Image (cartoon, rainbow, N blue to C red):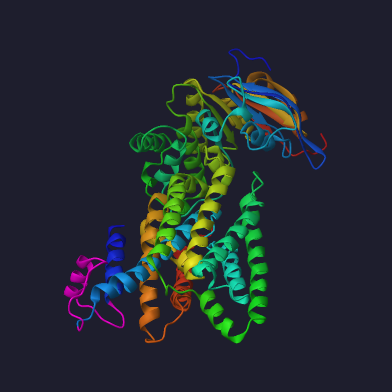
Amino acid sequence: MVWLAVLLPAAMLLAAATGAVVFNASDLWSALTAGPGAVVTDPTATNFAAILWGIRLPRVILAALVGAALALAGAAVQGLFRNPLADPGLIGVSAGAAVGAVVCFLFGWQGLWGGWLLPLMAFVGSLLSVLLLRAFNTGFEAGGTAKLILAGVALNALLGSVLGFVLYSASDSALRSMTFWTLGGCGGANWLQNGFLAVFFVAGAVVLGRHARALDALQLGEVQAADLGVSIHRVRGEIIVASALLVGAATAFAGVIGFIGLVAPHMVRLLLGGLHRWILPGSVLLGATLLVLADLGARTLVAPAELAVGILTAAAGAPFFLWLLRRPSSWSATR
Amino acid sequence: MSTNPPALLEAESLTLVRDGRRILDGVSLGVAPGRVLAVIGPNGAGKSSLLAVLSGWWSPDEGRVLLDGWNLGDFDAAGRARRCAVMRQENVRPSGLAVLEAVELGGLARAAGAEEARDIAWEMLRRMDLEALAARDCSRLSGGEWQRVVFARAVAQIWNQSRPGVVLLDEPVSSLDPAHQHSLLAEARRLARDGHAVLAVLHDLNLTAQYADEVALMSEGRLRACGPAADLMQPDVLSEIYGCPVAALVDPKRGLRSLVSLPSAKV
């Protein structure tokens, strides 16, 4: 846990210092301490402070918030479904956001309302997915959770076909920005967006944190958790909605970024064990670190061009996940 | 069913209908503090369904369950958990959870601090002879070890509270070796002695005769008889309920009596 807590600021500093203009330690320090409003008197000098506060930091912080939100939601949903494969991406929440956003591009609305219509539509898309899912959170009897995840998988497939249709009927120029969006990216970050995302993140984290113990009990089974005093129906609903808000908000600003929500909680479980009082905060730290590093890679690997960060997270996450599955000890037959 | 003292957990003419079949049909019984009630009967008699209703997981179609005089449905999950612990037949052994942590979950609904919850969990591990396994991952336990962990968790739920609790046990010794069968049921007796009410679904006739105060005989969703174990654990009663011959063997030297079931050849 301590290592994870050290790793995140280290990754953020590294990412803040790296880019088209590379900072050394003293540049970084003076720019950080100068603050966002620093006035540069020498016009020939590189304005480190302006780059740092205007471009780098918003982007790094967006990546950290998005990574943290996705990993936290992933950890909670995996715990709820007692299914290590569960991921907000799997149950249609990210796909709902993607459909909302892509519809914006289809009609050429992406610039409307000062560019805020796009994240709003994405958010509404994910919210609609959640409301639909919630309709399946009815059964109190055993199997209620299985029904929920199956409904999510079906919803995901349906939204995938909508997405495919929209992409199919889009113009070439719109297609490029849509594709970039469905693969995710942290470009174009600003402080206002980060503020919104931070509010959602804190709200989601507070709700999920309160259910850490209930998530532990749920590992024994739903019936058993109810025996132990967990109000299954209410807890299940709150966890689903909180996770969806986290993913919806993250996806609204950064597009669909896969594998962070799946891989980060898994790694944390290996490192810190099965209690959610460690898994949840650990996933926040690791998810943020991973996405900060992935975004760093996305904007530097093919500079001056930029990769969609989802390409990197999937390229690194999928092989890691396969390796994880091959480890005999991490996959228990009784799970 | 009137018992003396008044029952802590009471079922009033429970009826449960599933797919048009009456799985429970007017079952009334009660367990008083200080008592061990064994529910026995052939497969499909409705024993597990009875437990599902008594634990509040299923609502009965008719009748009601009273916990300490209050309608069970009026308790919230946490309030019910503080008064009524359930040990089910559980086959999910969660990975990533140590034995001590699993038993600590028994204190989930209690107001106890983390330290007290840990103390209670250790006490339960001591009683169930599980101390050596405290740090072991639950997924690495044998079926019998896990069954003892589940029992320890259930007891931790109602252990040492100001008011007596109810413990519902569904075939608690099905995976245990003989020595641990006795030690678990002895713990159940001890709970009764401490003032709790214990209800256990059992299959072993001799263990039932040895550890139960009262016996409820069920078949085809109905309560066939309910009364003192000494009266009901008799060859003729059991033969009729199970539909196979049951004989009593007596060892006069040691004053022991054991019940033996026989193949149902045409006698």
Q: Main secondary structure of the magenta part?
A: loop
Residue B60 included in the magenta stretch of the image: no
Asked if residue B208 is positioned above or below residue A31 in the image, the reply reads above
- For the residue pair A18 and A237, the one nearer the viewer reads as A18
Instruction: Tell me: B184 left or right of A175.
Output: left
Q: From the image, which quarter does the N terminus of chain B lie in?
A: top right
At 59% across and 72% down in the image, what residue appears?
A104
At 54% across and 74% down in the image, what residue appears?
A182
Q: In this view of the protein, can residue B175 be seen by the observer?
A: no
Residue B89: percent from left, percent from top: 59, 43
- For the residue pair B138 and A265, the one nearer the viewer reads as A265
Residue B253: percent from left, percent from top: 55, 22
- For the residue pair B48 and B255, the one nearer the viewer reads as B48
Residue A28 included in the magenta stretch of the image: yes
Tally of numbered discs: 0
Q: Quadrant of residue A72?
A: bottom left
Asked if residue A22 is positioned above or below residue B85 in the image, the reply reads below
Span of residues in magenta: A18-44
Q: Residue furthest top?
A: B4
- For the residue pair B70 and A9, the one nearer the viewer reads as A9
Q: Quadrant of residue A29?
A: bottom left
Q: From the image, which quarter does the C terminus of chain B lie in?
A: top right
Q: In this view of the protein, can residue B123 be seen by the observer?
A: yes
Residue A153: percent from left, percent from top: 63, 64
Asked if residue B55 is positioned above or below residue A22 in the image, the reply reads above
Residue B125: percent from left, percent from top: 40, 38
Instruction: Tell me: B99 left or right of B32.
Output: left
